[in-house]
Image (tube, rainbow, N blue to C red):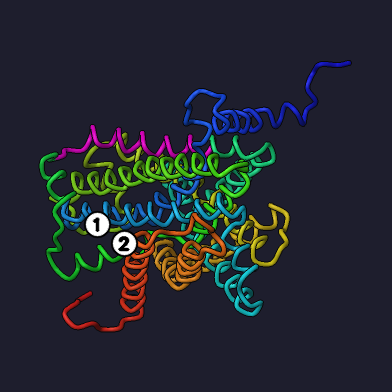
Amino acid sequence: MDDRASPKDRRNTLTERTTSAMRERLEGRGARVFLPFFGPAVVVSIAYMDPGNFATNIQAGAKYGYTLLWVVLLANLIAMLFQSLSAKIGIVTGRNLAELCRDHFPKPLVLAMWGISEVAAMATDLAEFLGGAIGLSLLFHMPLFVSMVITALVTYALLLFERAGYRPLELAIGGLVGVIGLSYLAELFIVPITWPAVFVHTFSPQLPNSEALIIAVGIIGATVMPHALFLHSGLTQSRIFPKTEAERTTLLAYSNLEVVIALATAGLINMAMVIMASGAFHEGHPEVAEIETAYHTLAPLLGIGAAGIFLLALIASGISSSVVGTMAGQMIMQGFVGFRIPLWVRRVVTMLPSFVVVSLGVNATNALVISQVVLSLALPVPMLALLWFSCRQDIMGVRKNRAFTTLLAAVAAVVVLSLNAFLLMQTFGVALPGVSG
């Protein structure tokens, strides 16, 4: 008998080893290792470091220095709460959020939710795909259309990692998160920073004026991404199946720990974006508000190295978040209507709006703003559904939300949805008393 592994066996080795390590730990046979459980929240954390965050954080730091760092902290805490609920639903029910909607809601409502969520997935990819392409275009001085084609090919190549099981793609996304994190760590050594002020403003809420309020709303209002809520439940639903309640308890504990670590990392990176923008632009260039302007301003201020590192982080962010957006789109379709399309078709469909926007000569930054409006309109679908399912005993059993968790999540949902409504009114020019801009 040939002892050599078949190509399929070799292909799945990494995923199988990860699953085996998790199984041993759950059964009390393995060492107390955490890394095999580390993956789903890392993938989802990319949603909180996408190119849209770059633009908002640059504007916050350039105009108000360190003053709005507390907003980034608050936004991150809200994100941790909702992503932990999404992960819990997948672990406890073995179903993802879209599948639960299909199982428990009337068909007309399910179809409407699917349509809204699909549009949101395309809007998400518009922001993320364009962000990565803009970074490539600026770094290598190539036409935007050419950089979009390159971004499309790289994104599709990364998506093919999933054919080898869940682990290779998790590691690839984790590597790109590392690139973003190390890039901003390097920036912090280049940019002049007043660290005592950083710590003070991280924990002391203040809003200097109504324009600062609008930027704060932009940071918090777009914090919880629709596709991230759908995706996290799908990533945890079948990664490993707990056989007993004790195993489920252990798995939930590891999941919550991973959410805290992964999203805390994302939060620190977002804070680093604000700190970098503050140190580089606040004193002499507070008007900087766009990614392209930030790059062209960084080069003469701090050197081409700092500007290049900034673009490297942007490219890693755009490519990885575009991959994650495509994964979420597949999961949304399969969950709501029970079928999926070939990966290349999904990739083409989600990229098409970006190519149309560029071909029509629409300003890329304006396109990013429009995509955020679409996401704001779509957010109530997964957020309210997540709250509804996670507090129902007939679905979650003994794992349903505690009263305090439900109250906290409900308050956070009201805050986020209200701020999204505020963003929409600002976008469509609805005047609000006492608020300018």
For label 2, the SS is helix
Q: Which residue is mark 1?
A: 71
Q: How many marks?
A: 2
The part of the image, by quadrant, that contains residue 215 is bottom left
Query: Are the residues at dot 1 and dot 2 in contact (C-beta closer than 8 Å)?
Result: yes
* Left or right: residue 159 compared with residue 305: right
Disc 2 residue type (three-letter): Ile
Residue closest to the eye, 160 or 333: 333
Marks 1/2: CA distance?
7 Å
Which sits in the foreground, 38 or 322?
Answer: 38
Say above or below: 267 vs 215: above
Numbered label attached to residue 11: none
Quadrant of the image containing the N terminus: top right
Q: Residue at position x 12%, y 64% from top? A: 208
**Label 1: which secondary element:** helix
Q: Residue tagged by mark 2?
A: 220
Q: Quadrant of residue 266?
A: top left
Q: Is residue 341 magenta?
A: no
